[in-house]
Image: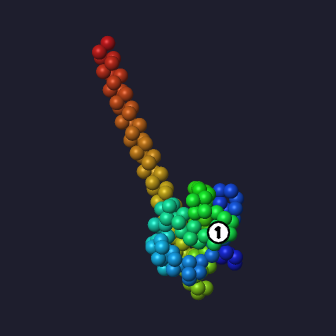
Amino acid sequence: MPETSPRFSDGQGVQWLLTLNTTLCRRMRDELDLDIADLQSGEAFLGMAADPIKFGALLWLLCEKQADARKISPESFGELLTGDVLDAAFEALMGAIVLFTRAPMRGAVQTVIDQAMKAQETGGQAAMAWMEEQGHQVQKKIKGEVEKALAKTISGV
């Protein structure tokens, strides 16, 4: 586990430090309806991973003081959060959650996070397989329609 607070770089290469504390966790709960206890169980973790807007709001909450010091508005901050940046920020947040957890529970929390990440990856693979199968079905349907149209054209000649 990292000994320093996890970081991620935004779309312009600026580094942002992610540190959790009880005040930020209370704000997460009150303002974003994200409870760190649920994050540690994996439930809210997966929901947050699926909602980039809510995740962006969480990142703003965690980085707001840094952004204020850099004179970056919430809108400008959000514009820096693109796909790969969100992935890096998510990984950094998972590290921050582990570090926020009391030492005796860190291993268990890391295991929950690892399992949730595997579940998310498996879900992505299943979605890809489903999309590929749907693509094959559409191709078969199109091929059948083209063959019917050709047969009709040939029989009409």
* Residue 146 versus residue 157 in the image, above or below: below
Residue placed at 51% from the left, 80% from the top? 26
Amino acid at dot 1:
Asp
Residue placed at 57% from the left, 59% from the top? 75
Residue placed at 70% from the left, 59% from the top? 13
* Quarter containing the C terminus: top left
Measured as percent of width and height from the top left, residue 135 is found at: 43, 42
Residue 107 seen in render:
no
Q: Which quarter of the picture shows residue 93?
A: bottom right
Q: Please name whichever residue, 38 or 139, is drawn nearer the observer in this view of the structure.
A: 38
Measured as percent of width and height from the top left, residue 156 is found at: 29, 15
Q: Which quarter of the picture shows residue 17?
A: bottom right
* Residue 122 versus residue 132 in the image, above or below: below
Q: Is residue 5 left or right of residue 78?
A: right
Circle 1 residue: 68
Q: Secondary structure at mark 1?
A: helix
Neighbourhood count class around disc 1 (C-alpha, 10 Å): few under 14, some 14–19, many 20 upward? few
Q: Please name whichever residue, 121 or 101, is drawn nearer the observer in this view of the structure.
A: 101
Residue placed at 60% from the left, 65% from the top? 89
Residue 104 seen in render:
yes
* Residue 73 versus residue 110 in the image, above or below: above
